[in-house]
Image (cartoon, helix red, strand yellow):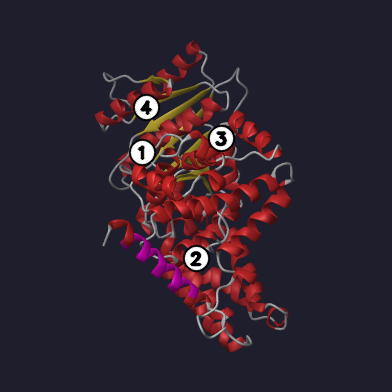
Amino acid sequence: MFEGLQDGLGSALKTLRGKGKLSESNMRDGLKLVEKSLLEADVSFEVVRTFMSRVTEQAVGEKVLKSLNPDEQVVGIVHQALIDLMGPVDHSLHLKGKDEVTVLMMCGLQGSGKTTTCGKLGRMLKESGRKPLLVAADLQRPAAIDQLHVLGEQLGIDVYSDRTNKDPVKVCNAALKEAKKLGVDVVILDTAGRLHVDDELMGQLTNIDRQCGPDQALLVVDGMTGQDAVNSAKAFNQALELDGVVMTKLDGDARGGAALSVKQVTGVPIKFIGTGEHLDALEEFHPDRMAGRILGQGDILSLVEKAQREFDQDEMLAQEEKMRKGEFTLDDFRKQLGQITKLGPMQKVMGMIPGMGGMMDSLGDDVDPEADMKRLFGIIDAMTAEEKRNPTKVIDQSRRRRIAAGSGVQPNEVNDLVKQFDAMAQMMTAMAGKGIKERMKMAREMQASAMGGGALTKKKQGTGKRLTPKEKAAARKARMKEARRRKRGG
C-alpha cells in the first residue's frame, strides 16, 4: 500500500538527514522533493500546494533550524500535516437503539466494490451485536442482486430483493417495512452504480435520499482510480451531502493520492478502508496510523487490534503460563508462528512493525517470508517429540542429517534453526510475566541486534572498520542469495 509515496517521502526526508547542517536553503530543497513525491502519488495539485505551504511555514522557522535535531522535527511536522490532511474522522455510524431502525445508504460507481462493501459492513455490524438487513436496490445490474444474496448466505444475514419491481425507491420503502417485521435494527441499502457520474444516477439517489431518509450516506470509492475517485466523491457529495467515504482496494498498488486528497477536496472524511477481498477486510480509517504507514513508521496499533481478533486467546494464555515456568519448546514456537500467519501476508505484517518494513526492503526482492516460514515449519515437523522439547542437547550431527532429509533442506539450515530457537527461547521466557513496556523494550533491543546494531555490528574482514548501513544491506542480500543458491543445489 502506497509504496511509491513511502519511497518518495522516505528518500526526501533521508536527504534532509544527510545534510551536515540544515539551512533555510537546503531545507527548501528537501521540501521540494517532498512536494514532488506527493504529486507523483497523484495527490491533488491544490491539496499539495496547501499542504506544502503549511509544512514549509513551520519547517523553515528559526525554532526548527536551530533545534538539536532539525531533521527529526521536519519528520514530525510532515507527520502532523498528513494527519491534519486526512482527519479528523468520526467512525460512528450514529446507530439508533435496537428497538429502532437505522438506515445506511451505500452508493458509488460500478466496479468500486460497493456490493462487497455492503457485505463487509453487514458482517461488522453483526459482530457488534446488531441485526442488519441487506437491500438489493441496484436494479441496473441483475448480477448485483445475485451477489448480495450470495454474501447474505455466507454471512447469515437476511437480504431483501424484488426482481419484479423496477423502481428502486419502492424497493427501499418495502424493505424498510420488511425490516420491522424481521426485527432488524440496521438496513443497508445497496443502491445503483454507473460507469460514470450522470444525471439519471444522481436523480435516482436523491429520490431514495429524500423519500427513505437514510441516517447515513456512505460513498464507496476505488482507491486505485486516483483523482477520479476524488472527483466522483465531490459530485456525489454535492448531490447527497455524504456522511463518509469507504475507500476500497488499498491492498493493491494504490498510489495514495485519493486517500490524501478526498477529505481536503470534499470535506468528507474516509471512515473505513477495504484492505482485501475477504469479508473481514474492512477497517476503521485512522489518519494518524495511516500517516505512520506512509512515513515508514509502521502501524503497531492496528496490528495489535488484529491480533486480538485473530489469535486463539486460550492458546496464548496457555503459552504464557508455560513460559512463566521456563518452558518453551519448538512445538510452542511453531504454534506461535502459526498464530502470526493468521494476520495476513508476512510482508504486510512486517510492514506494520516499526522499523521492520525498511529492514525487509534492504534484504532485496529475493527474500520470501512466506516460503521461509513454510521451510521452517517443515523442519520442525520432521523432528521427533523429544527433539522438539530439547533441540540444543538432543539434535546431534546424525539427527541433523535425518531432519534435513525429511524436510528437504540442508543440514546447516537445521543447525541455524536450532541456534535461533535457543536465543528466542531465552528471550521468550525472560519476557513472560513482564509488562508491555518492558516487552517492547526487549523486542527493540533484539531487533537492533538482529539488524547489526551496537556490539553485534560486524567488521570488515582485515580492516577493523564497522560496516556502513549500505554495506550491511548489501552483505545481507549476498548471504540470502548464496543461501538460496545452496538450497536449489546450484
Report the residue at 42% width, 21% height from top: 173
Residue 258 in view here: yes
Task: Say which label, 4 or 1, has the lower sequence index.
Answer: 4
* In magenta segment, residue 479: yes
Observer-side mark, 2 or 1, equals: 2
Left or right, 26 with reference to 45: right
Residue placed furthest toward the top: 181
Give percent across and percent down for residue 304.
Answer: 60, 44
Q: Which residue is mark 3?
A: 309
Q: Amino acid at mark 1?
A: Gly
Please identify, in this view, whether the residue under mark 3 or under mark 2 is nearer the observer: 3
Closer to the observer: label 3 or label 4? 3
- Mark 3 touching mark 2, by CB under 8 A? no
The answer to whether 143 is drawn above or below residue 326 in the figure is above
* SS at badge 2: helix
State whether the magenta stretch is mostly helix, strand or loop.
helix
Dot 1: element: helix
Task: Name the disc covering residue 203, or none.
Answer: 1
Tell me the residue that label 4 is attached to: 151
Query: In the rendering, at what x and y percent does residue 290 appear?
Result: 54, 55
